Image (cartoon, rainbow, N blue to C red):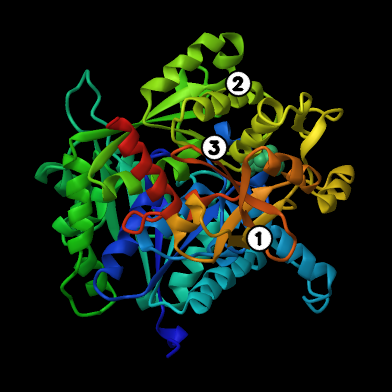
Amino acid sequence: MSKNISETKYVFVVGGVMSGIGKGVANSSIGKILQSKGYSVTAVKIDPYVNVDAGTMNPVEHGEVFVTADGVECDQDIGNYERFLNKTLSTHNYMTTGRVYQSVIERERNLEYDGKCVEVVPDIPNEVISRIKKAGEINDVDFVLTEIGGTIGEYQNMLFLEAARMMKLKNPGRVLFVMVSYLPIPEIIGEMKTKPTQHAARTLNSAGIKPDIILGRAEVPLDEPRKRKISIFCNVDKEDVISAPDVSTIYEIPLNFERDNLSNKILKKFNLKPKESDLKNWRKMVNVIKNADKKLKIGMVGKYFETGEFTLSDSYISVIEAINHSSWANKRKAEIFWLSAEEYEEDPSKLEKLERFDGVVIPGGFGSRGTEGKIKAAQYCRENKIPFLGLCLGMQLATVEFARNVAGIKNANSTEFDKGCKPVIDIMPGQKKLLKKKDYGGTMRLGTYECKLKKGTISSQAYNEELILERHRHRYEFNNKYRKKLEKNGLKVAGLNPKTDLVEIIEIEDHPFYVGTQFHPEFQSKPLYPHPLFKEFVKTAIQHSQT
Ligand code: GLN
């Protein structure tokens, strides 16, 4: 039965002091604890930047581009939401300043404002409000949890705070504000300081919003004196100041929140009765994550992780998650080793290091930098029977490698990297025109497509299904003109799109696990429901580690 939308409750999560302190995970965790009490929830991410979606941003700068089933290129927080809530989200769960303005302007151009002057306030906040409400309606939920990106006091997110304020004014009993703040412990002072949080609360007050709950992010739990101070100076009940200390796994956060009874506090504020929560399986999983002593060593050959002196793994977050989920299901802790593809180009003798790993993954990517190194890594794994999983670009390069070194097509490559090559991977016909017009935004082959599996393959054994649905993000594809020749040399086409014959999965013979997918299975893996293909990969990697 569909819910009465006049009953839907709205929680806003905003960030104080600085960014990067885990608002997304806090939002996901609030969702999880409400869900554990039998409520239905959905989560919305607001990104204050002007980009219409995250697809045009460099992953080193922005982190992974997550893709929804309906083909939106969005922020990695949507991935966190899906993983914590075990849900499939859509375009309704994500907005940016660019998206909001784009629809208001489109509507204005279509004369939908009846000749009125269209103004930033209230027309932009009104659009934001209608999107948040729509997310509740479409998902048919009790709670919509909205994370406003950026930090309080920033110019960019003001209109979103304004929308939240307007929602509270109209529905006072159905809107709640959670401020996630950071409490530093400067080494030189040796004491946890609350002042930045006090300032953040005041800045939020000046936007017309009073926080109902404050989540205090810090290295360690907040003590009583800190809670008291925050309560007095930020104008919240002491019991509504919740500790959110650093954790070894993000999946512990819902359990920590429950230790402070957060879900019942939220329910009480909405005049709902307290309830028992069921986090049994979740707790079991967290125990495994924290206590698994057996390791699984996975090498990841990529390029989006070096930025100055730092190494960022955010660009591949869903792949790491998917490896972890399957490892946890086997009571193992995955250790991921970052391998720079370019190193293999400079010094092929380094390839021998791949021998140390139980399995190797080549994830997705764009542009030619590092591709020859990845091809060498794929060759090494094929020849040395190391479990290998190629994702999107990883599958394309495994095909190129096979074409060159097994099928003898010397100049084989993808036209993404070499226009004059033997194009075993080529641009999709529909994509050619788009690139000519420089129409880059949101125009790849995106989102869910069907794939029919061939019986007797590793993939069909892993999925145990004939027809699967997987998410995509690419412009280039396996060139069917070369299919016969490659198949004759032992390449197996294990999955095909039933409508277009686009090759979705390749495998090779006489290898424990050598699979390349044009799609991104990592987007659908959930902590308690690991993805079948990753499960099979991890299973083989464990066997490999024991040989
Ligand atoms: N660059 C390749 C393409 O566009 C692969 C994309 C990816 O790995 N997501 O087809």
Cα distance in 3D space between marks 3 and 1: 32 Å
Q: Residue at x 59, y 26 (%)?
A: 374
Cα distance in 3D space between marks 2 and 3: 13 Å
Q: Is residue 61 left or right of residue 200?
A: right
Q: Amino acid at mark 2?
A: Gly
Q: Nearer the viewer, residue 389 or 314?
A: 389
Give the structural element (helix, strand or loop) at label 2: helix
Q: Amino acid at mark 1?
A: Val
Q: Residue at x 41, y 38 (%)?
A: 18
State which tag comes first along the sequence, 3 or 1: 1
Residue 373 shows which numbered tag? Answer: 2
Mark 3 residue's CB less than 8 Å from ligand 1: yes
- Percent x, y for residue 241? 21, 53
Mark toward the viewer: 3 or 1: 3
Mark 2 surroundings within 10 Å by alpha-carbon count, few (fewer than 14), some (14 through 19), many (20 or more) = many
Q: Is residue 370 left or right of residue 385?
A: right
Q: Which residue reaches farthest bottom?
A: 1
Q: Residue beneath label 1, please?
A: 100
